[in-house]
Amino acid sequence: MEFPEKYGADVIGHIRRGLEILAVRLEAALLALPRLRGQAKNAMEDIDALVLPATASSRPRSAPANEVREPLSRFTRPFNTTGQPVVTLPAPAPGLPVGIQVVGRTNAERWRSPLGSRVSGDRRHESKDFFPAVFSRHAEAYQRRLENIMARGEAPGRARVIELARARPGMRVLDLACGPGNLSQRLAAQVAPGGEVIGVDLAPA
């Protein structure tokens, strides 16, 4: 495995488990996949859509990635396998966002847009109109979570970005899609004195 230091412990664990899978087991799984997808298609023959929670729990404010990955992906993995179209919609809830997924039939071309519109109240949302408000509303919690992750050394990718930037005193840095500014603040410390970091993000706060 090349550059294992670039991955978190949870990702390294998944990669190593994947490398332990025998070729015969992989081949058997690939042969079984079309049969599984056919069974799912037949099961949905008289069903327009399934309405299900998108996750098995709400997003925790702070937790190691390996502890939350399974409950957060439990209800989406089956449809990644069967290849069915899915629309995920935000549901009103206190705290961090909660999603509802609407699952359609495979290859039902006319399902995608009309049903998605009906479920969302026939309103058309542009991502640039919807997501800034969502991100701004949860910016403070997201910033705290990122700080905790970086403090525990579980964000090697972000640390690598700072390393590759090679920021020095007096430099001017543009941080695009800066989010709540966790990296911007670290870069600002490196370009001081005399430098400047400008953070730009879709969400205003």
Image (spheres, helix red, strand yellow):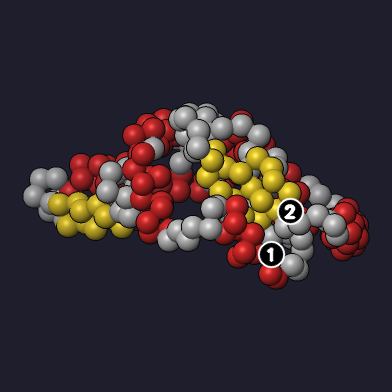
Q: Residue 35 appears at what percent x and percent y?
A: 91, 60
SS for dot 2? loop
Circles 2 and 1, Cβ within 8 Å, touching? The answer is yes
* Residue 55 drawn at (x, y percent): 63, 39
Is 129 placed left or right of 187 in the picture?
Answer: right
| Horizontal arrangement in the rendering, residue 194 relative to residue 117 (left or right) | left
Tag 1: amino acid: Trp
Q: Position of residue 122 (x, y in %)?
A: 53, 58
Q: Residue furthest left?
A: 194
Point 34% across, 43% down: residue: 136
The spot of residue 46 in percent (x, y) is 85, 57
18 lies left or right of 159: right
Relative to 172, residue 156 above or below: above
Q: Residue at x 17, y 57 (%)?
A: 172
Picture mark count: 2
Please name the amino acid that badge 2 sits on.
Ala
Q: Nearer the viewer, residue 24 or 145?
A: 145
Mark 2 closeness class: few <14, some 14–19, many ≥20 residues within 10 Å: some
Which mark is first along the chain, 1 or 2? 2
Instruction: Residue 49: give its label.
Output: 2
Spatial separation of the CA atoms under disc 2 and disc 1: 9 Å
Seen in the picture, residue 60 relative to 198 is either above or below; the reply is above
Check residue 85 in the rendering and tell me which mark sits there, or answer none. Answer: none
Residue placed most toward the observer, 41 or 169: 41
Marking on residue 111: 1
